[in-house]
């Protein structure tokens, strides 16, 4: 690139960082997204009850990690594109998770020099059921059975790999995410607060919240 | 030409390599807070503006009006908070007029975050945005890079840690309006006393559902200057007049015109 | 070793090494002031100690009675200030052992402090130093220093954070700079005269309350040490705490 060094991982001075633990997991009836709730500026916790699970369409959500400003802007763009796209669809049809994830990928790839955004896009649609896409920092896209991301995820790669099962029941999957994120929060200083979850199924959206008293046991 | 002008950027960066200090913007090393209560929302700010270690303004206004019932407390670079707030206030009014509806807090917030994101953090505006609209009372915050947060109580600026300590210990969901005002004022005071970037007085703005917003300018004044021990009036003539010259810079001509001589256009 | 660093304008990325080096100095704020009268001298300082935007203490005195009717302060980096004063005190003790308890004259103290400061010429005490007392004739004396020992006897001197705010005020009110006798058309300067102790205390209080208004590193309290032939006396006045 013209021989100019570009550091895509930098955070601009004073930028709000989502040093995060996020994940999304496919299960029997759809998909569940999970996230911690900590937002930091340096060592200060700017928000301890952040909602990092952002709605993109009726049953498509994303988990955000990296720069708060960048990921919010990207999510707002995708939400807008999907609204326009959905309006052109036949009645009773909604965009697929695949479409949403690829819009994310397109934006993250084309603007990779200016973005610090690690996104997991997950959702439920009639055609594919639950699906999970990971869009890490360079703007690639990876379809997975489950995805973990953010600074806290490094601590739970092994555990998730050992304990993930195909086609879990809802309660089993909630427990899987809760245990994984509680470990990530335990070991990662930039993650913390409550554990938020969003369950996306044929029936729609269900939100869960778990407080430290419970998940720390 | 609209927008910011960068034509001196190259010259200035050349100058800075030659040892000329780049000019410092007045930063409102600030404490600002906001807190919700059933039926409304309160925001508050201190009134000190600093330039480095010097107090630039002892009683500046950090509470800005975006719309009659949407107000904004600003921290960061004074000029940026002022200009960004004026721009969004203006666009918000045009928007409200074209849509024939009362403006919403979320609209103001979206306009702010999109504007700030576009400038990638170079506009140093950190804002707590609050108000009442047809959907209820809201309290939100925006950071310079364009990220936003929602919360029942918030603080921003160099005194935000001192203020947050007060908010975290004393906030309740069922605060009355008076209690919410007291809590915000206490949080600002914590900043005034314990953060060197904050000082002087407390400004408060209360926005209640179904009522006009109320601005309490200098709600608390805990830092009135004490009487000086000596008088520093100089006897006239203490300062030498070295040279004196008086000149007319304008010739004024007055003519009286009687009413019936004036042409009055009555047609539209 | 080159590291990539993002500049304020992110389209231009400069390649400069990031330095991670221990910085032995810090600025603890505060301001000090000394005025010499005909038969007295005062040293005054605020009692606030800061680090960045935080207050470390609202009452940390920095004017010290170092013995032999001399008061001393070293304002700037607090740790260096304390170290310098401790060192002087200890050396004064040794001086007395060697000289049968004889009094150290202020001009000798002044010259000695120059050597203490210059002794660290290439790793200086980061302070502006002031001492005050009475000279051999019993007249008020104030000596002021730069960080490496250049010194001068003066009628008055302000040092520290708000020195640039207070010094012009002192020039005007103590040495009557820019003041002329009314009616002389700027030909005759207002004649110098010694100020009384009461006038000096009033000037000092006004100087500090004004500096508190406009400088964020000044405030909380004002402590004044007054040297007369009868010894050293201390006065305290509260300042604004914001």
Image (tube, rainbow, N blue to C red):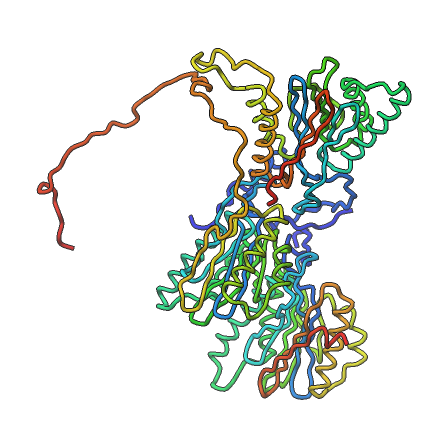
Residue A73: horizontal and vertical position, in percent?
A: 56, 64
Q: Quick one: quadrant of the C terminus of chain A?
A: bottom right
Residue A138 visible? The answer is no
- As rendered, which of B222 and A47 lies closer to the eye? B222
- As rendered, which of A77 and C242 lies closer to the eye? C242
Question: Is residue B93 positioned above or below C77 on the image?
Answer: below
Residue A146: horizontal and vertical position, in percent?
A: 71, 78
The quadrant in which residue C218 appears is top right
Question: Is residue B226 positioned above or below B237 on the image?
Answer: below
- As rendered, which of C77 and B2 lies closer to the eye? C77
Q: Which residue is drawn at 52% across and 65% down?
A: B139
Q: Quick one: quadrant of the N terminus of chain A?
A: bottom right
Q: Residue at x 43, y 13 (%)?
A: C185
Residue B175: horizontal and vertical position, in percent?
A: 54, 67
Question: Is residue C81 positioned above or below B189 on the image?
Answer: above
Residue A56 visible? The answer is yes
Outermost residue on the left side: it is B260
- As rendered, which of B158 and C219 lies closer to the eye? C219
Q: Residue at x 49, y 16 (%)?
A: C180
The quadrant in which residue B135 appears is bottom left
Does residue C75 appear to the left or right of A106 in the view shown? right
Residue C217: horizontal and vertical position, in percent?
A: 64, 40
Outermost residue on the front side: it is C230
All told, the count of numbered labels is: 0
């Amino acid at each position: 690139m013209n021989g100019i060094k570009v550091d895509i991982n930098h955070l601009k001075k004073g930028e709000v960082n989502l040093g995060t633990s996020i994940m999304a997991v496919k299960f029997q009836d759809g998909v569940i997204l999970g996230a911690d709730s900590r937002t930091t500026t340096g060592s200060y916790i700017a928000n301890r009850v952040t909602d990092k699970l952002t709605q993109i369409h009726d049953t498509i959500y994303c988990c955000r990690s990296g720069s708060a400003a960048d990921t919010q802007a990207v999510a707002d763009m995708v939400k807008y594109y999907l609204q326009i796209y959905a309006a052109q669809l036949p009645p009773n049809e909604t965009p697929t998770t695949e479409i949403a994830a690829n819009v994310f990928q397109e934006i993250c790839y084309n603007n990779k020099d200016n973005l610090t955004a690690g996104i997991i896009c997950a959702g439920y649609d009639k055609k594919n059921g639950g699906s999970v896409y990971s869009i890490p920092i360079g703007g690639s896209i990876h379809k997975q059975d489950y995805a973990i991301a953010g600074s806290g995820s490094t601590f739970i790669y092994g555990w998730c790999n050992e304990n993930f099962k195909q086609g879990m029941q809802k309660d089993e999957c909630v427990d899987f995410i809760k245990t994984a994120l509680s470990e990530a929060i335990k070991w990662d200083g930039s993650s913390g607060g409550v554990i938020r979850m969003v369950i996306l199924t044929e029936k729609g959206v269900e939100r869960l919240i778990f407080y430290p008293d419970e998940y720390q046991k | 030409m609209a927008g910011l002008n960068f034509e001196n950027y190259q010259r200035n960066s050349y100058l800075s390599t030659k040892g000329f200090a780049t000019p410092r913007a007045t930063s409102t090393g600030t404490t600002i807070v906001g807190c919700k209560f059933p039926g409304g929302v309160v925001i508050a700010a201190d009134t000190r503006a600093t330039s480095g270690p010097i107090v630039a303004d002892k009683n500046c206004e950090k509470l800005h009006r975006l719309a009659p019932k949407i107000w904004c407390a600003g921290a960061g670079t004074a000029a940026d908070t002022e200009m960004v707030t004026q721009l969004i206030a203006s666009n918000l009014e045009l928007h409200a007029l074209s849509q024939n509806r009362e403006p919403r807090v979320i609209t103001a917030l979206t306009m702010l975050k999109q504007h700030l994101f576009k400038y990638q953090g170079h506009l140093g505006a950190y804002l707590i945005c609050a108000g009442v609209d047809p959907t209820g009372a809201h309290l939100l915050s925006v950071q310079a890079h364009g990220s936003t947060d929602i919360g029942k109580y918030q603080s921003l600026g160099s005194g935000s840690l001192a203020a947050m300590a007060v908010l975290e210990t004393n906030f309740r969901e069922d605060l009355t309006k008076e209690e919410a005002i007291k809590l915000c004022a206490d949080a600002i005071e914590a900043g005034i006393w314990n953060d060197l970037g904050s000082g002087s007085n407390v400004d408060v703005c209360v926005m209640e559902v179904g009522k006009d917003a109320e601005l309490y300018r200098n709600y608390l004044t805990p830092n009135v200057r004490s009487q000086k021990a000596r008088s520093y009036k100089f006897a006239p003539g203490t300062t030498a007049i070295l040279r004196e010259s008086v000149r007319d810079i304008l010739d004024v001509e007055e003519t009286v015109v009687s009413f019936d001589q004036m042409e009055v256009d009555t047609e539209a | 070793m080159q590291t990539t660093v993002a500049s304020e304008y992110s389209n231009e990325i400069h390649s400069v090494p990031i330095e991670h080096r221990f910085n032995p100095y810090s600025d603890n704020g505060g301001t000090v002031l000394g005025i010499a009268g005909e038969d007295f001298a005062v040293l005054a300082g605020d009692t606030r100690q800061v680090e960045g935007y935080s207050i470390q203490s609202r009452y940390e005195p920095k004017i010290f009675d170092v013995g032999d009717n001399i008061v001393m302060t070293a304002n700037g980096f607090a740790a260096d200030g304390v170290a310098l004063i401790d060192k002087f005190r200890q050396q004064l003790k040794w001086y007395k052992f060697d000289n049968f308890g004889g009094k150290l004259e202020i001009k000798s103290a002044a010259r000695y402090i120059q050597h203490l400061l210059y002794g660290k010429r290439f790793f200086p005490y980061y302070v502006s130093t002031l001492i005050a007392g009475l000279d051999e004739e019993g007249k008020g004396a104030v000596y002021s220093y730069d960080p490496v020992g250049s010194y001068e006897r003066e009628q008055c001197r302000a040092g520290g954070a708000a020195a640039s705010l207070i010094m012009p005020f002192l020039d005007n009110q103590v040495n009557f700079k820019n003041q002329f006798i009314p009616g002389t058309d700027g030909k005759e300067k207002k004649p110098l005269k010694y100020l009384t102790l009461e006038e000096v205390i009033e000037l000092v209080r006004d100087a500090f309350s004004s500096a508190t208004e406009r400088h964020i590193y000044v405030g909380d309290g004002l402590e004044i040490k007054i040297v007369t032939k009868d010894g050293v006396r201390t006065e305290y006045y509260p300042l604004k705490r914001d």
